Amino acid sequence: MPAARGGRPPTIRSVAEHAGVSKSLVSLVLRGSPRVSEARRRAVLDAVRELGYRPNATARHLTERRSHTVGVLLNDLRNPWFVECLEGLNSVFHAHDLRMFLGDGRLDRRTDEALTQGFLELPVDGMVLVGTMPESAVIAEAAATLPTVVASSRDFDLPGVPVFANDDRHGAALAVRHLADLGHRHIAHLAGSFGAVARLRRESYEQTMRAHGLGEHIRVERCDLTEEGGYRAAVRLLTGPRRPTALFAVNDMACVGALSAAEELGIAVPGELSLVGYDNTYLARIRHLSLTTVDNASHEVGRNAAKALLDRIAGRADGAGEHLLPPELRIRSSTAPPTRLTTS
């Protein structure tokens, strides 16, 4: 960075002197105020560029009483589902000159609490809670202190905090209905082992199976939300009695694991086994995998959550409650009518 007089970094004062204007006018230009003539704005911006001035974020925070940052707490960045939700959040925050600080708790309550406490100490202007994680006293305290929204989670019950998510019950019903309409009767479910989202998808699977007269064929195999978890659960189902002709997985990661299990066991997909995932991540869209899956509108969920947080930061908070976006089924190459007849 170029130095001002005496070898010191350039300041607002040195920018003002270089441009021949007042410090207050430099501040107005840096804040994007429309109350500055184009000639003076150009003079200030030229001085900023020539001196290499960089605004002091701490001083800006003290002046405006805002940090222009948002804390985003999520449970595991390794899950590709988070990418599109974060992109949706950032598309709005970036347009409003807000930066995201990401905290990855990986379902460790102590880590979640430490990250949340860090958001309070920075401090950030607002907080977004993304995905499945345990609610805690620290998170509840932060949500009562900071403008807060929840994105793509159904686990939180925080007073006055809105929740933006996809309709998990409807999405699971779309998946099971698609398989039943293809003629599958032996449809099993790789169910998540924790969290409200996994519970809602499992309950909807069971309800939809009963609605299609398939209640006697309900089979639930629990797994975690990883590829390895889906692989292990699928092996148990595919090597046991009454092998299913179709699997509906709690998410795309588990579905990819099920696909690996089928390939290792020599079971053709979709000829002998149809697979449906959930989330429509980039994994499902890879041509080699081409998974039928439920699109949970994660990008739009992120955008809506970000817009709501901006309103709350500005003091325009609306009511709490759940705001559910409708999911859509994306049919690809992993589903087809059953070719293996079963008598059980």
Image (cartoon, helix red, strand yellow):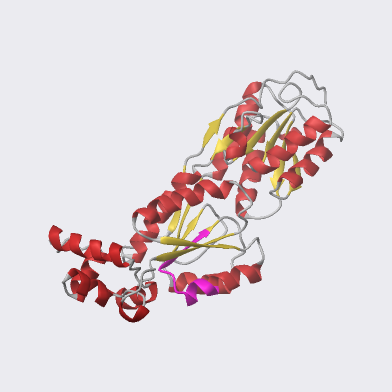
Compared with residue 267, is residue 198 higher up or lower down, i.e. above or below? below
| In the foreground, 289 or 254 | 289
Q: Is residue 323 visible?
A: no
Residue 324's x, y, as percent?
47, 47
Magenta highlight on residue 122? yes
202 left or right, relative to 294: right
The quarter of the rendered structure image containing the C terminus is top right
Residue at 73% x, 26% y is 269
Tell me the quarter of the picture where residue 21 sits: bottom left
In this view, the residue in front, 215 or 33, is: 33
Q: Which residues are magenta?
A: 117-129
Query: x, y (%) of residue 293?
Result: 60, 34
Q: The N terminus lies in which quarter of the figure?
A: bottom left
308 versus 62 height, above or below: above
Judge left or right: residue 214 versus residue 69: right
In the image: residue 293, left or right of residue 20: right
Is 202 contained in the magenta span? no
Instruction: Give me the residue at 61% from left, 30% from top.
Output: 177
Left or right, 33 with reference to 179:
left
